[in-house]
Amino acid sequence: MLVEAISVAALALSIAAFVVFVILTFRRPPKVSGAGKTELQSGAADTAKLIEAVAKLAESLAKAGPAIAALLAAIFFMTIASIGSGLFK
C-alpha cells in the first residue's frame, strides 16, 4: 500500500515537473550572471574531487535555468515511480 502511494505521488510529481518544464521552455530565458569560482581548502583527495564535481554540476545547472531543472525533476520522479511500480524487477 505504501509503495503504491509513493509510486502514485512520484508519477504525479513527474507530470507536474514536466508541465513546469514545458511552460518554462516557452518563456524568455533569464540573463545569467557569472558565478564565482569555488576553491577547496583541505580534505581527502577523493572527497575534494567529488565536491568539486558536484559544484561544477550545480553551477552548470544554475546557468541552464529552471527549465532544465524541471526536466531533471520530471525524469527523477518518473524513475522513482517506475521503480515503485516494479518496472525494473
Image (cartoon, rainbow, N blue to C red):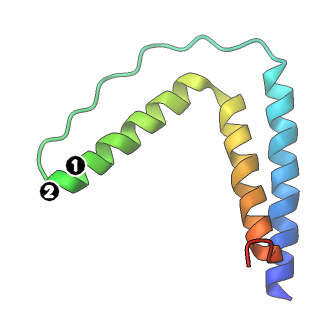
Task: Where is residue 59? Give x, y as percent.
Answer: 45, 30
Secondary-structure class at tag 2: loop
The percent position of residue 10, horizontal first and vertical second, equals 80, 63
- Measured as percent of width and height from the top left, residue 51 is found at 31, 47
The answer to which image quadrant residue 83 occupies is: bottom right
* Residue placed under numbered mark 2 in the picture: 44
Label 2 sits on what residue type?
Ala
**Does dot 1 land on a helix, a strand or a loop?**
helix
Whether residue 37 sits left or right of residue 14 in the image: it is: left
Q: Residues within 10 Å of mark 2 (few under 14, many from 20)?
A: few
Give the Cα distance between marks 1 and 2: 6 Å
Between 30 and 54, the one lying in front of the other is: 54
Is the Cβ of the residue at disc 1 closer than 8 Å to that at disc 2? yes
- In the displayed structure, 48 sits above or below 89; it is above
Q: Amino acid at mark 1?
A: Ala
At horizontal 80% and vertical 45% (from top left) the residue drawn is 17
Left or right, residue 45 beside residue 69 = left
